[in-house]
Amino acid sequence: MIRVRPDPLPWLYRWRTDLIQTPLFGLITAFFGSIALAISLFERSGNLQHRIARIWAGGCVWASGSKLRLVGAENLHRCEVAVYASNHTSYMDTPVIFSSLPFQFRILARRELWRIPFIGWYLDRSGQMPIDTDNPRATLSSLGTATKALRSKMPLFVFPEGRRTAGGELQSFLSGAAYLAIRAQVPLVPMALRGVFDLLPMHARHFFPGELTLSIGRPIETKGMSLRQMDELTARLRVAIVELLETANESATKERRIADECTVV
């Protein structure tokens, strides 16, 4: 059951984060980051580093004290290569995504992440793709590199909002995900994260564990589409993610009602 984060957060959660979870995160990240960095000296494809990143991500979700549920997992196997796109709610989104997608993929992410110790080193040495939205020329170059990766059969993951939400609401979408899917003529797969915002929202540093849900929708086909339909595809993607979030909210409400009825009985 997904819980709503209280404000202010009770002292027990703050104490547990400061004394237990934050040190655990640091140790897990430093340990697996060091292994990935060492492996990158002789393994240039990034495939082995990706496997290590999945273990790191699972460790991060475990250290947060949360349970992760995957909904619509069958949609992950409907296409060989695709652009996967999700709402962006928290720094914890990335561990949730890495621990959930059971195949090799690369991410297109904001360049600022490359400045974080260990995480940035991993991103730089494992074939991930930075994008600088403040520099149009650099953005075009990154999109070109990403398109080549898709055409070479490497799936990509992007956050179409471009940055984390400050209040939990879904923001407007940039057209990068639609651009990549159309240019490479691969499906666009909508995904929705729920519960991760309450776990660790923007500007917060303490965890509020609960149930995290990643919902995967049916792929949106792009064969035959042109770049003139980029805005149309972006709108379709956003609608699909909204529907996934609404379905997840309805399911959580139903589960909460059943739990309350059982408590009364």
Image: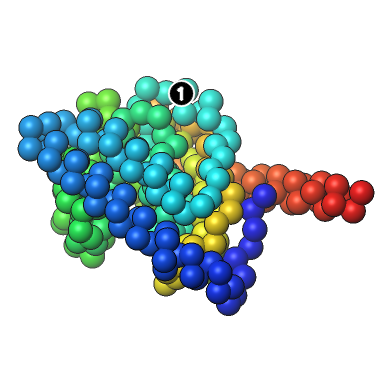
The image quarter containing residue 97 is top left
Front residue of this view, candidates 127 and 159: 127
Q: Residue at x 19, y 34 (%)?
A: 46
Q: Secondary structure at mark 1?
A: helix
**Residue 72 position in % (x across, y down):** 57, 32
x then y, percent, for residue 249 = 67, 51
Residue nearest the viewer, comparing 192 with 16:
16
Q: Looking at the image, which residue is at 37% across and 22% down?
A: 80
Number of numbered callouts drawn = 1
Q: Residue furthest front?
A: 19
Quick check: can you spot residue 106? yes
Q: Is 48 displayed left or right of 156 in the figure?
A: left
220 horizontally vs 247: left or right: left
Q: Residue at x 38, y 41 (%)?
A: 98
Counting from the top left corner in percent of width and height, residue 111 is at 22, 58
| Residue 139 seen | no
The quadrant holding residue 157 is: top left
Above or below: residue 5 compared with residue 185: below
Q: Nearer the viewer, residue 199 or 62?
A: 62
Which residue sits at x=40%, y=29%? 102
Q: Amino acid at mark 1?
A: His
Residue 78 rendering spot, x and y as whole percentages:
47, 23
Residue at which label 1 appears:
77
Eyeballing the image, is 2 above or below 186? below
